[in-house]
């Protein structure tokens, strides 16, 4: 059973004029193209094909709006950093995401999805910075936690917490082993209250 049984796709936006009406509350999800963002979304919502999962990184090229319930939304931002796309497309993504963070009054939280085996990228820091500029809480999901031994995973978690300080929360997450799913759902629910 889905954690959000009424969850459904609303629309995709290639331009800021295509964003859904700016009312209610929404939490955005950002991450590198190969960090497991779509898998994390599907696991949190508990619907297999809710967000599109692909073997080819960089498939999320638009801003995708999903309704969770009433005026509560999840927003899947374009993947960044790895996708093999022309620089003009990357520039458009940056401009689109910049407009998203500047314009959305309904944005109440940001999940940044980071592969636990990689350090925070410049793009991850950019997302966190944009969120902090508008006083939007950010939460980092260290995905693919099942790929590291417990000690290494714990050391990485502590290191990332040290880098981010007290302003951003961080947790382990594994879509495969379902590690951290309850914690992620609680964080999402609190953001959308």
Image (cartoon, rainbow, N blue to C red):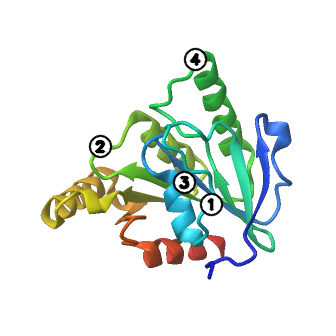
Q: Is residue 52 above or below residue 122?
A: below
Query: Disc 4 or 2, which lies upstream in sequence?
Result: 4
Query: Disc 4 or 1, which lies upstream in sequence?
Result: 1
Q: Are marks 2 and 3 in contact (CB under 8 Å)?
A: no
Q: Which residue lies furthest to the front in this view?
A: 55
Residue drawn where x is 46% and y is 32% of the image: 81
Q: Mark 1 points at which residue?
A: 49
Residue drawn where x is 62% and y is 55% of the image: 51
Q: How far apart are marks 2 and 3 (CA)?
A: 19 Å
Callout 1 environment at 10 Å: few (<14), some (14 to 19), or many (20+)? few
Q: How far apart are marks 3 and 1 (CA)?
A: 9 Å
Mark in front: 1 vs 2:
1
Q: Distance between the residues labelled 1 and 2?
A: 28 Å
Q: Is 70 left, or right, of 179 in this rendering?
A: right
What is the x, y in percent for residue 178? 40, 72
Mark in front: 3 vs 1:
1
What is the x, y in percent for residue 95? 66, 29
Q: How far apart are marks 4 and 3 (CA)?
A: 22 Å
Residue drawn where x is 80% and y is 69% of the image: 71
Task: Label 1: state its secondary structure.
Answer: loop
Q: Name the residue under label 4.
A: 86
Task: Label 3: state its secondary structure.
Answer: helix
């Amino acid at each position: 059973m889905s954690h959000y049984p009424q969850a459904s796709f609303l629309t995709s936006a290639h331009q800021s004029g295509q964003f859904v009406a700016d009312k209610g509350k929404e939490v955005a999800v950002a991450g590198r193209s190969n960090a497991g963002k779509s898998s994390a979304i599907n696991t949190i919502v508990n619907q297999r094909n809710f967000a599109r999962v692909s073997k080819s990184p960089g498939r999320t090229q638009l801003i995708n709006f999903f309704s969770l319930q009433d005026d509560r939304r999840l927003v899947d931002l374009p993947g960044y950093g790895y996708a093999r796309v022309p620089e003009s497309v990357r520039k458009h993504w940056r401009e689109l995401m910049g407009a998203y963070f500047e314009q959305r009054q309904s944005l109440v939280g940001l999940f940044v999805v980071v592969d636990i085996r990689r350090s925070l990228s410049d793009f991850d820091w950019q997302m966190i910075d944009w969120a902090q500029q508008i006083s939007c809480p950010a939460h980092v999901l260290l995905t693919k936690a099942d790929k590291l031994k417990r000690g290494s995973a714990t050391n990485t978690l502590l290191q990332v917490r040290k880098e981010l300080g007290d302003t951003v929360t961080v947790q382990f997450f594994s879509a495969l082993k379902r590690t951290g799913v309850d914690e992620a759902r609680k964080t999402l629910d609190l953001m959308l209250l």
